[in-house]
Image (cartoon, rainbow, N blue to C red):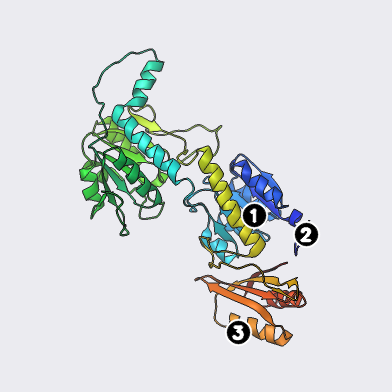
């Protein structure tokens, strides 16, 4: 194995929550030391694991990475969220500690969209109730309460990557599609935007939610919003658990105001497969409950694993941070070569305060070093400077940068 600035076999990767095995294999092929677990870790377990010297952490949606855990993780370079959302990670605090966070916002889009369409059809045909009855030995051949989706109106709350994919599939089934988004979006096909959420709720036969977890979306659909929905309408939530007021939804179904619902996400979810699930929706008719598997197809999980792995490897091996959700974005070319030698690449994360770049350049001038390339990007918390320098001077530059009081983290690649 080619000698590197830091022995690759000493780079520790911790992958939690049953991340697709191709991720572990990709890191092992790179020469890293990999530990995997099928379960999430609680805060105490994670804090202990990170303090033991993890360099790369891979999680899904159940593992929370709080500021306290980050404070005790001196070697942590980067976190990969092998999912869409990153609200389970204290991203601002991670940035302040020089830890770049990456996710995979698009890889499971099709899987979630297909599940949503399947639920739209299943709810309109009451398929889960019919199937459950057959398993009990009941033969109830009736058209009562069963409808075609053709000609019905689907309202999409959120018209991003998933919502717009659902829109295309629904229109192919002959549905009329409305959508509401807080950001102006280009409609696909014959989909039409609504000016307000209330307008969409009143006009839709089925409402499907595709929004992130934010303070603004917390209980976005509660009693007042459910009352606006058509009698006999359906509600689908494959977005985030906090978006729907579950007791209010249960009341609406029991009162026969809504004809059914499908939920894949919940405010409180079990940490593992051996823990029980509890909800006010249990046992209600025409309610489809799935255990947060919207993006859990083999195709999506493999695609996510490949996507996030490549982002993490590009950051660890080359310093490229362009797709990070919390870090100054730098897309970097290969390290420069001069006189047949590849340059040393110095990565410097520092507090974003005035005068740091001047100090860096003063250091370089004092050392009499010719820099082959220099890159800088900042955000509100940190600056990220990358220097490609002659191998003769790499160690001296690194030592000088580490002595700067504004330095958060500095490392070299060669």
Horizontal side of 59 relative to 130 (left or right) equals right
Q: What is the x, y in percent for residue 200?
A: 24, 48
Q: Residue at x 68, y 70 (%)?
A: 345
- Residue under pointer 1: 56
* Pick the front one: 181 or 373: 373
Do residues under tags 1 and 2 come within 8 Å of each other at their CB atoms? no
Query: Which type of secondary structure does the marked residue at label 2 adopt?
Result: loop
Q: How far, Cα to Cα, is label 1 from label 2?
A: 21 Å
Figure check: 213 above or below 147 = below
- Residue under pointer 3: 358
Figure check: 8 above or below 345 = above
Horizontal side of 192 relative to 48 (left or right) equals left
Q: Quadrant of residue 354?
A: bottom right
Figure check: 289 above or below 129 = below
The N terminus - image quarter: bottom right
Q: Quadrant of residue 201?
A: top left
The C terminus - image quarter: bottom right
- Residue under pointer 2: 2
Q: Is residue 51 visible?
A: yes
Q: Residue at x 38, y 12 (%)?
A: 137
Q: Is residue 63 visible?
A: no
Q: Quadrant of residue 312?
A: bottom right
Q: How far, Cα to Cα, is label 3 from label 2?
A: 35 Å
């Amino acid at each position: 194995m080619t000698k590197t600035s830091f022995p690759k076999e000493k780079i520790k990767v911790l992958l939690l929550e049953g991340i697709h095995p191709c991720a572990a294999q990709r890191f092992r092929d790179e020469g890293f030391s990999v530990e995997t677990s099928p379960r999430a870790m609680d805060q105490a377990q994670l804090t202990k694991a990170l303090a033991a010297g993890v360099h790369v952490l891979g999680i899904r949606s159940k593992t929370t990475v709080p500021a306290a855990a980050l404070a005790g993780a001196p070697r942590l370079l980067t976190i990969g969220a092998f999912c869409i959302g990153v609200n389970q990670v204290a991203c601002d605090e991670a940035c302040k500690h020089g830890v770049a966070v990456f996710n995979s916002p698009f890889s499971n889009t099709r899987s979630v969209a297909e599940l949503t369409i399947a639920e739209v059809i299943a709810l309109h045909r009451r398929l889960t109730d019919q199937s459950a009855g057959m398993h009990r030995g009941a033969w109830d051949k009736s058209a009562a309460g069963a409808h075609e989706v053709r000609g019905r109106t689907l309202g999409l709350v959120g018209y991003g990557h998933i919502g717009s994919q659902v829109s295309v599939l629904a229109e192919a089934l002959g549905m009329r599609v409305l959508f509401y988004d807080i950001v102006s979006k280009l409609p696909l096909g014959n989909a039409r935007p609504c000016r307000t959420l209330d307008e969409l709720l009143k006009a839709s036969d089925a409402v499907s939610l595709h929004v992130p977890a934010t303070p603004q979306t917390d209980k976005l659909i509660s009693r007042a919003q459910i009352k606006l929905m058509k009698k006999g309408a359906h509600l689908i939530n494959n977005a985030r658990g906090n978006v729907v007021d579950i007791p209010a939804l249960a009341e609406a179904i029991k009162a026969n105001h809504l004809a059914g619902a499908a939920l894949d996400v919940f405010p409180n979810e079990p940490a593992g497969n051996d823990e029980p699930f509890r909800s006010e929706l249990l046992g209600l008719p025409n309610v489809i409950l799935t255990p947060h598997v919207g993006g859990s197809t083999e195709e999506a999980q493999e695609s996510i694993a490949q996507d996030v792995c490549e982002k993490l490897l590009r950051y660890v091996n080359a310093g490229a941070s362009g797709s990070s959700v919390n870090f100054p974005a730098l897309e970097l070319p290969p390290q420069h070569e001069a006189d047949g030698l590849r340059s040393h690449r110095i990565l410097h994360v520092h507090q974003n305060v005035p005068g740091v770049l001047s100090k860096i350049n003063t250091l370089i001038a004092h050392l009499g070093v010719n820099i082959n390339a220099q890159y800088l990007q900042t955000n509100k918390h940190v600056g990220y400077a990358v220097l490609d320098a002659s191998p003769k001077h790499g160690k001296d530059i690194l030592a000088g940068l580490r002595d700067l009081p504004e330095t958060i983290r500095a490392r070299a690649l060669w």
